[in-house]
Amino acid sequence: MSSRNPSYSTPKECNHLTKYKLKHGLDGYYLIQEFVKTNPFGRTMIDKSKLELPRCSFCSGYQGRLYLCLICSSVTCCLSPGSDHTLLHSQSFDGHEIAVDLERAELYCSVCCDQVYDPDFDKVVMCKHMMELPRSENGDLRLCKRKRLNFGIDLDLRNVKRLVSSRDQWSESCFPLGLRGLNNLGNTCFMNSVLQALLHAPPLRNYYLSGRHNREMCRKRSNDRLCLPCDIDVIFSAVFSGDRTPYSPAQFLYSWWQHSENLANYEQQDAHEFFISMLDRIHEKEGKASHAIRDYGDCQCIIHRAFSGLVRSDVTCASCGFTSSTYDPCVDISLDLDTHTSYPINVGKPSKLNESAGTSTLVGCLDLFTRLEKLGSDQKLYCENCQEKQDALKQLSIKKLPLVLCLHIKRFEHFPIKRLSRKIDRHLQFPFSLDMKPYLSSSVVRKKFGNRMFAFEGDESDSNTEFEVFAVVTHSGMLESGHYVTYLRLRNQWFKCDDAWITKVDEEVVRASQCYLLYYVQKVLYHKSSEDVSCLPMSPHADRFVPIAGCC
C-alpha cells in the first residue's frame, strides 16, 4: 500500500467544536482518556466500570443514548428528538455544546444533533489503544501484515473456478470478512449506508480487491490527485483488511466534496442522490481509462459493467396504433409506491389505511412501472403516420438487465408550487428472491398482444432474470431529520450496519424496515459471492498492507 496522499485533508469541523477547541484546547480530551477502553472486537467506548452508574442529570434516567459534557462532566440523555436533554443542557449553559457518547466514545454536538469528527480526538483515543496493544520483546508493536485479496470471479462468469477453502467455516460468533463499521463524520449516515452496499456488491468488490484499479498507474496517467476511484480502492483495502475497528472515510468524503461542490456541506443528503453522484464520478475517471466498446457504444468501465441497464419506452398513437420506441441507459430504476392497493400491516399497531399507512409490494410497484398509461392532453405525440399530434399511450419496460439491480423507492415527494415536501412512511413488502422476467420488454410486449407465442425483435430469453437481494438501505424518521441504515445479506445471514455499529439481526427486522434502496444481484453471482472471502487466494501482484486500528 502506498503512503497517504499529502494533498488530502480532513473535513472541516463544526463551528461549535471549533469554538470549544479555541477556548479549551485538548484538555477535555485528555481528561477522559483514562476512561477510554477497547474491547476484544476493536470497539472503543467509555469504561463505565470506573464511573458511578451514569444517569441523566435532568431525569435521572439511564435509558437511551447517554452523553458526557466535556465542560462540566454532566451526563444527559437523548431518547428522541422530542426528549433531548443533551440539547436542553447546552441551551441552559452557554458553551456546553460538545459531549462524548458514552457508548461509542465519539464526539457529539448537541446543537447539530450528530456526531462530529476531529482527528485530534481520534489521536487521543488511539494513543490509549496503542498503549494497550501487545508488544514484542524489544517493545515494538506486533502488527499483522496482509496481502491484497484476489477474487477469481470473472464479471462475465465464463472463467469461474472452484475455490477451495483452506480454513474452517466461520462460526456463528464470527462475522464474515469485510464487515467493518464506518464512523459518522457529521450527518454522513447517507454516505456510510450507500458505501456499505457498494462494498459488498460482488462485481465492484471483485474488481477492486483483485487489484484491477492500480492507484500508482492512475496517478501517473493523471495530474488530478483527488481521484474518487483511488479513494474507493483505499476503503476496500481497509474494510477487507480484517480490522474490525470502525473506519473513518474522511479522505473519500473530502474528495467527493471536491467533485460535487453543490453537495459539499455537513447537512444531511439524500442517499439516492449520493449513489448516483458517486457512480457518475467513478465513471468519469474509469471511463477514460477504459477503451473497450461493445454494442450500442456501451462504456466498459466497472460502473457500467455492473450497474448499467437499458429501459425501453414505447409511445403509441391512440388513433392509428403507430408506436415509437426509444432506449435509455440507466444505473437504477425509480419506483412509485403503489398506494392504490393496500394490505394490512403486520408490523406495529394497526392504523387507518391511507397513502402512508397500509403496505405495498415490490411486485405491485414493478407492475405500476410497466403499466400502460395515457399521456395528458399537453403531452400529445406527433404521429409520423397521421402527420399530426394525437393522444398517446406510454409504456415502460426493461430491455437489458444489469448484473446489479438497484431499485429506488420514491419515499420523498416534493410540491414546487406549494413549496412543500413530505415523506411517505408506507411499508413495502419485498422478496429476497426476485424474478424480473415479467418486466422485460419481450414479456411486456407479448402480454400486450395477448401472450401470443411468436418471437419478438430482440427477445431477451437468454437473459439471467433471477436476482437475490444482498443490501437494503433504509430511512427512518422524518424528512428533515431522518437516519439511514443498511442491512447486508451475507451467506443468507443479515447484518445491520448503523454507521460504526455492526450487529447481527433476524430477517423479520429487515422486512419490517422502511426500505429506500434495494440492491439485487443476479442469482448466479450471489451464490458465487457467498464463498468466504478469506478463503480466496492471494494476488501475486499484491502490495503489503499494515493495518493499525483506527489509523487507516
Image (cartoon, rainbow, N blue to C red):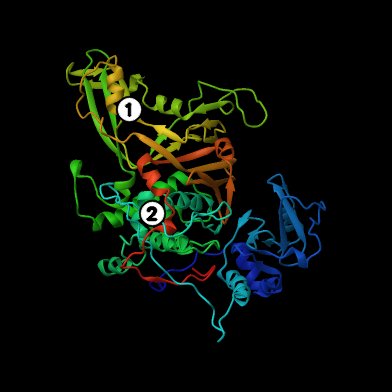
User: What's the residue at 77%, 68% (across, down)?
Assistant: 50
Dot 2 or dot 1, earlier in sequence = 2
Residues at marks 2 and 1 touching, judged by CB atoms closer than 8 Å? no
- Residue 425 vertical position relative to residue 50 in the rendered view, above or below: above
In the rendered structure, which amino acid carries the disc numbered 1? Answer: Leu
The reply to whether residue 257 is visible in this rendering is: no
Residue in front for this viewpoint, 209 or 402: 209
Crowdedness of circle 1 by 10 Å Cα count: few (<14), some, many (20+)?
Answer: many
**From the viewer's perspective, is 199 left or right of 214?**
right
Percent across and percent down for residue 115 are: 60, 58
Q: Which mark is residue 396?
A: 1
**From the viewer's perspective, is 526 left or right of 82?**
left
Percent across and percent down for residue 259 are: 38, 57
- Residue 295 vertical position relative to residue 178 in the rendered view, above or below: above
Percent across and percent down for residue 418 are: 52, 32
In the rendered structure, which amino acid carries the disc numbered 2? Answer: Arg
The residue tagged 2 is 205
Crowdedness of circle 2 by 10 Å Cα count: few (<14), some, many (20+)?
Answer: some
Residue in front for this viewpoint, 457 or 194: 457
Q: Which mark is residue 272?
A: none
Marks 2 and 1, how far apart at CA: 31 Å
Picture quarter with the N terminus: bottom left
Q: Secondary structure at mark 1?
A: strand
Percent across and percent down for residue 474 are: 53, 42
- Residue 30 vertical position relative to residue 525 in the rendered view, above or below: below
